[in-house]
Image (cartoon, rainbow, N blue to C red):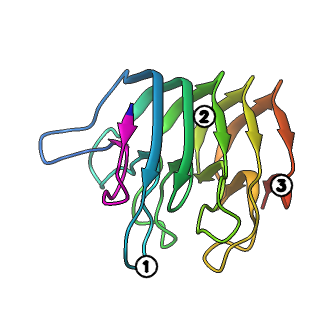
């Protein structure tokens, strides 16, 4: 159980550092909740970081049977900056997870926010309750944007969201 106690920047973070980037990360059978910042900013339940220039990147990440709620941002974010200076993770599998929003007035943005993903499979998940917020008008169960390629979305149960699946 990863309980942020409303004080953490991210529940679980997979990202590069000065010595390299992770390959083959498995996040499985975890509950993540209450990742929250007192000031503005995102505190995602699971954050999959972007790749600095010259590095191979975050590759082959599996997120399986994760339950996530009440995070100041997204249940899962695959990150890439809007200026294109870095690339998103490659070959990410998210399956058999349950993502939901618990607070109608909170900044819980999206179930999955995938920015320019490079090979993403999102399957057999349950996602519900996401609404637009001042920081994310989409309020989507699944939001795929900023380009990317190789995205497969299949076998999910999605309901009670402003947008169920949005690709733009």
- Residue 107 picture location, percent across and down: 58, 68
Q: Residue at x 78, y 33 (%)?
A: 153
Residue to which mark 3 is pinned? 161
Q: Secondary structure at mark 3?
A: loop
Residue 61 lies in quadrant: top left
Q: Secondary structure at mark 1?
A: loop
Disc 1 versus disc 2: nearer the observer:
1
Residue 119 disc label? 2
- Residue 103 picture location, percent across and down: 65, 61
Q: State how far apart marks 3 and 1 are (Cα).
A: 23 Å
Mark 2 nearby-residue class (10 Å; few <14, some 14–19, many ≥20): some
Residue 49 disc label? none
- Residue 23 picture location, percent across and down: 33, 26
Position of 143 with respect to 25 (left or right) is right
Q: State how far apart marks 1 and 2 are (Cα).
A: 31 Å
Residue to which mark 1 is pinned? 40
Position of 114 with respect to 51 (left or right) is right
Residue 118 lies in quadrant: top right
Nearer-the-camera pick, 41 or 85: 41
Q: Are marks 3 and 1 in contact (CB under 8 Å)?
A: no
Q: Secondary structure at mark 2?
A: strand
Number of numbered discs overlaid on the protein picture: 3
Q: Write the start and end of the magenta stretch as one range.
A: 2-13
N-terminal-most mark, 1 or 2: 1
Q: Is residue 5 above or below residue 156?
A: below
> What's the magenta bit mostly, secondary-structure-wise?
loop
Q: Is 9 in the magenta? A: yes
Q: Are marks 1 and 2 in contact (CB under 8 Å)?
A: no
Q: Residue at x 30, y 54 (%)?
A: 52
N-terminal-most mark, 3 or 1: 1
Position of 43 with respect to 123 (left or right) is left
Q: Are marks 3 and 2 in contact (CB under 8 Å)?
A: no
């Amino acid at each position: 159980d990863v309980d942020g106690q409303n004080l953490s920047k991210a529940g679980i973070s997979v990202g590069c550092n000065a010595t390299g980037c992770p390959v083959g990360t498995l996040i499985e059978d975890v509950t993540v909740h209450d990742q929250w910042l007192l000031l503005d900013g995102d505190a995602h339940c699971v954050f999959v970081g972007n790749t600095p220039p010259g590095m191979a990147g975050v590759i082959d990440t599996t997120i399986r049977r994760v339950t996530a709620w009440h995070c100041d941002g997204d249940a899962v974010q695959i990150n890439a900056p809007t200026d294109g200076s870095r690339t998103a993770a490659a070959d990410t599998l998210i399956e058999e997870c349950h993502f939901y929003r618990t607070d109608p007035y909170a900044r819980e943005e999206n179930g999955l926010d995938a920015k320019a993903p490079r090979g993403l499979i999102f399957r057999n998940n349950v996602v519900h309750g996401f609404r637009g917020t001042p920081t994310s008008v989409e309020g989507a169960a699944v939001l795929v944007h900023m380009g990317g390629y190789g995205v497969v979305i299949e076998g999910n149960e999605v309901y009670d969201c402003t947008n169920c699946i949005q690709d733009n």
